[in-house]
Image (tube, grey):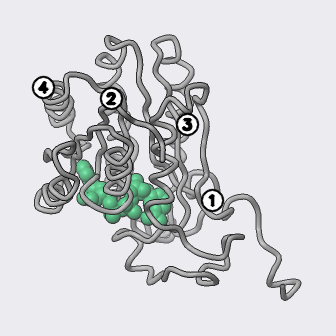
Amino acid sequence: MVDLGGKTVVITGGARGLGAAAARAVVDGGGRVLITDVLEAEGAETADRLGGAARFLRHDVTSEADWQAALDHAMAVFGRIDGLVNNAGIAAGRLLEEESVEHFREVVETNLVGVFIGIKTAVPLMRAAGGGSIVNISSAAGLTGLALTAGYGASKWGVRGLSKIGAVELAEAGIRVNSVHPGMTLTPMTAPVGIQAGAGNFPGAPLGRVGVPEEIAAAVAFLLSDASAYVTGAELAVDGGWTAGPTVRHLTGQ
Ligand code: NAD
């Protein structure tokens, strides 16, 4: 378990899925967390389950005013913000030719513009506190050209690039910025795909299975913690090797 004692973290889209698992990892590591989401009932329940070290606030990441209110709330409750996890996101599998301009814009607005506003709003607070760690949840779709992800993939490549720009520009303020690239992971987002846990259920990844939220959360916790003090501008694939290269099992029969 990673030591997050004394740290306070804001996690967007934390009502369920990867964000909720990351919130659990922060609390288990001894930190405190503000979960934000547009899903009010689920967000409040998730925070309740985590006990006194967790709070919830409704927050739409596409809104500048909501961002200011969320971070003001975190400052009022915790007195400081050491970590920000830009996790909120939306996905839909559509062929590029079938993607509408309207939907492409909507996905980019949430997945990329939302991350930009979050970084921009958090930086003055972290700068004043002497530093911090920003973890942006991109995707395997931000490392490769994954079919059926036109708007989503473009937004996740954008998150990867924005993370590098942030790492370079904000190092002087003591702020580290890294991206995490989950592979296929069992959450409400991927439920419609019909994936199942267990060995052999995802042959596309060299490890042969899909991930579980706790495996992504462990990477997030590492990047939030001082154990990663010399890590910034990194892109951490947590994908069972999915983006490392094609498997050739279908050729060799092994
Ligand atoms: P999820 O749908 O279970 O959770 C995403 C959360 O984001 C939801 O609670 C949702 O309400 C919230 N959200 C959506 N739009 C929002 C907005 N405008 N403002 C605030 N909150 C909003 O999905 P998940 O699988 O837990 O995904 C979390 C992140 O991980 C996303 O950025 C996703 O793209 C990324 N990711 C997931 C996978 C996977 O296989 N599950 C793989 C790669 C990347």
User: Where, by quadrant of the figure, is residue 201 drawn?
Assistant: bottom right
Q: Residue at x 33, y 14 (%)?
A: 129
Q: How many marks?
A: 4
Name the residue carrying label 2.
Answer: 6
Name the residue carrying label 3.
Answer: 161
Q: Residue at x 23, y 46 (%)?
A: 35
Q: Residue at x 40, y 43 (%)?
A: 112
Q: Residue at x 41, y 72 (%)?
A: 190
Give, as a three-letter code, the residue at label 3.
Gly
Structural distance between the alpha carbons of marks 4 and 3: 32 Å
**Precedes in sequence: disc 3 or disc 2:** 2
Disc 3 or disc 2, which is closer to the eye?
A: 2
Local packing at callout 1 (Cα closer than 10 Å; few below 14, some 14-19, many 20+) is few
- Secondary structure found at label 2: loop
Disc 1 or disc 2, which is closer to the eye?
A: 2
**Precedes in sequence: disc 4 or disc 3:** 4
